[in-house]
Image (spheres, rainbow, N blue to C red):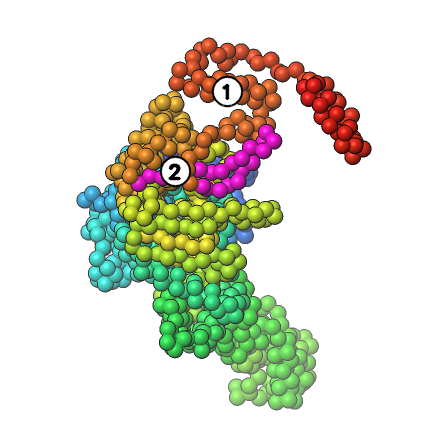
Amino acid sequence: MNAPVTHPPEIAAALEGATPFMAQYLTAKAGQADAILFFRMGDFYELFFKDAEVAAAALGITLTKRGKHQGEDIPMAGVPVHALDGYLARLIRMGHKVAICEQLEDPAEAKKRGGKAVVHRGVVRVVTPGTLTEDSLLDARGANRLAAVAVRKGRAAVAVVELSSGAVDSVACSIEDLGAALAAFRPSEVLVTDRMYSDETTRDALNGSGGVVQALASAIAEPQAARTRVERLYGVAALDGFGAFEEAEVSALGLIAAYLETTQAGKVPALAPPRRLGDSGFLAIDPATRASLEIDRTQRGEREGSLLASIDRTVTSGGARALAERIARPLRDPLAINEQLDAVEWMLERRDLRRDLRDGLKASSDVARAVGRLALGRGGPRDLAAVRVGLSIAEGIAGLFVGQVDPLAGQPRRIALALDRLTLSADLSRLKADLVDGLIDEPSHLARDGGFVRPDYRPELDAARTLRDDSRRVVADLEARAVAESGVPFKVKHNAVLGYFLETSAKTAEGLLRAGPDSPFIHRQTLANQVRFTTVELSELDAKISQAGHRALAIEGEVFENWRREIARLAQPLQAVAEALAELDAHAALAEWAQEVGATRPVVDDTLIFSVEAGRHPVVEAAVKAQGDPYTPNNARLDGSGADCARLAIVTGPNMAGKSTFLRQNALLVILAQAGAFVPARSMRLGVVDRLFSRVGAGDDLARGRSTFMMEMVETAAILTQATPKSFVVLDEIGRGTATYDGLAIAWATAEALHETNRARTLFATHYHELAQLETRLDHVCNLSMVAKEWNGDLVFLHEAAPGAADRSYGVQVAKLAGVPTSVVARARSVLERLEGEKAATARLDDLPLFAVAEPEPIRGPSVVETALQNIDPDSLTPREALEALYRLKGLA
């Protein structure tokens, strides 16, 4: 969370005595006091005062001075206009807001008002982490969301907008579920009221979101004011047509509407109607669980190594974002989940169609983001080309599915809906045809550069271009016609005073001078030896040629603006096409991944069963196979009702044997199944899960004064207060951060509560072997152990989860594998033998010199028996000699 940039409080007073230029800057700055102001001056953006100091330190640019203001030097820094995006990206990543103040007129126009006139400037946009739209600032395969959070009448709500694509979502939930609801969207920026910003009950949820938090005035979120702002944003008289929103949802949407009004400087983005997701449509996953399971980012914050990265086979940026959303927010309605699975299965069964679909999509463009930029006036000709390509590919892909319909079963509902959206309306077909006719194949990036409209699209543009590019030929044609008409040997010439004119000798001009006012040749100037004439056509040509370049750019600008306005008008159907392409890409990608790894369709229903046969961890398996090693699959069975099998499994075994992998594996299978994906297992049956909890590994939170054990207990408390009989819980090593008996007591009580009170399906890994006794004390508990074997003094991990409890932890053997010095391992083994010999409960630890320096065991040479054995050659012995050698060795021993 970055503190806003602070500025001198006397900005208003500072206008006194300021130069016209500095007064203009200070006025713009007064309206954006919490942002770094980039002030356009020719080919540079300049920064002054505190902004210059902050930017110089953040960007590593030179801090200098420009004149004085009220007797003090003015700090100044600057960046080139062409390099703006790179500097913006760095400031935004640091959490800063940046206001862009542009020149709103040509400097030549300002000069007409007088030598001291200042070019008109104004703030055209405020750039924040959640309002980015430029491709250069965005992750093409990841969403960039602006979220707002509100609480009304004991209910919380999260509203989210992705400005680059126009998607708007709203979800209402309990205050306890706010963290899970917010984390599911992974916002870049979160808006809250100043009252919520200081509220302890919501701080964890805000901090767990991962986004920069911005506090706004509480009055903005008042329901009536918020409703008015949202209605104004969408241009509607009431929100009822969008759904029955709770007060908290309206407040959250109002925060977003107010923020967009401020940051977009009055430009209205192309937003889809808000989708009300409800508080029961998605699997609840709190921030700690998301971090633990590394769903879309590893615990180091990287995409590579996450679940999403391991399954992503999408070929478009829109498809990648759709898949990421699907994995981040798994469903919890069995009907909706099975519809998604139907689509994946249908794609999996049609390999040729899937190949053609993916080949077609590879040539697609990011239509959604192109439309978003164009609607906000930030797009260029390449965005027009992206829309054209997207519409063309949509038509082609729709054609691939012709004849693919089973006359009996038809198509899966999700496939059919996507194809319906790919059918272009009359307006979209006209737009595509117009762009095909009028836009060149490879247009420029900026509209102001021109050259993007095809020849023959606008006759007046062709004429202007001809004058601009072929003026010599045009002038030569006119000269020839003038000579032919008059019989006088004219030459067309040009100077700065007369412009273009016809010149001939004084002698040959005599006839034209006597012709009078009816002559088409108008006398302009007489010199000693030449006479100069003009014609109406030549005068008009002179004006046209001098203005041809400007006119050509103006006509292209008009054409671009017409296309831009039409795309903004058709934003919603265009976004629907983009969503359909993205959804088909996601379905096909999941089918591709399923075929690649041998994944199977899970059976998802409304029971309390969790049954996996030969399940595999999708991320670990990929890493293991990349090294050429096999992956050991495992079974797991739980039944929340306890009728078919245990509700809670105690998982024991040595470190490094795979307990944490086994736990995470099963949690990730839940996510995949409820995201509508196939799962890496021989088979799986899943009674749909409402909340997923994972406490596997923990770190401290030094900034908030929380130790590792305290963090563990906070997360455990959240599980015990929120888990329900339909939840799925994986817990690893509860209680290990405190004294042995305290930890054992906490682990024991937690296991009992999960079994008896929460009644959630639970995998409970522990090193407290005493917990294995719960199998005989509680009705629905079983023991599982990760199998390890000792071989020639070494420990071999089999990575198999087998029934029964582990008989020991093999900690000393693991220490040896880790490279702990031999003397320490030997000392640990001797202490362990004594403790185990005295049954631990009665062993007096103070009798053991635990803190004495253990003498390393002396290095011994081979024994007499070993020496004698080495001197025997078995292949050369007769049976009698061999028997004698055996007796001799026995005697030596």
The prevailing secondary structure element of the residues shown in magenta is strand
Position in image of residue 637 (x %, y %): 38, 47
Secondary element at tag 2: strand
Q: CA distance from mark 1 to mark 2?
A: 26 Å
If you read the primary sequence from the N terminus, does the residue marked by circle 1 or circle 2 appear first? Answer: 2
Number of residues whose C-alpha sits closer than 10 Å to that of mark 1, classed few (under 14), some (14–19) or many (20 or more): few
Which of the two residues, 400 or 33, is positioned nearer the viewer here? Answer: 400
Indicate left or right for 460 with 126 as reference. right
- Kindly identify the amino acid type of the residue bearing the numbered disc 2: Asn
Secondary element at tag 1: helix
Q: Which residue is the site of mark 2?
A: 783
Evaluate if marks 1 and 2 touch, with contact meaning CB atoms under 8 Å apart. no
Residue segment shown in magenta = 780-802
Q: Quadrant of residue 561?
A: bottom left
Which of the two residues, 285 or 737, is positioned nearer the viewer here? Answer: 737
Q: Residue at left 56%, top 79%?
A: 538
Above or below for 760 versus 333: above
Above or below for 406 versus 258: below
Position in image of residue 238 (x %, y %): 21, 60
Q: Residue at left 23%, top 59%?
A: 243
- Kindly identify the amino acid type of the residue bearing the numbered disc 1: Glu
Q: Residue at left 58%, top 31%?
A: 794
Indicate left or right for 23 with 817 as reference. left
Question: Does residue 32 appear in this view?
Answer: no
Judge whether residue 539 is colored magenta.
Answer: no
Which of the two residues, 133 or 334, is positioned nearer the viewer here? Answer: 334
Judge whether residue 784 is colored magenta.
Answer: yes
Number of residues whose C-alpha sits closer than 10 Å to that of mark 2, classed few (under 14), some (14–19) or many (20 or more): many
Question: Does residue 809 appear in this view?
Answer: yes
Indicate left or right for 122 with 478 as reference. left
Q: Which residue is the site of mark 1?
A: 833
Above or below for 736 versus 218: above
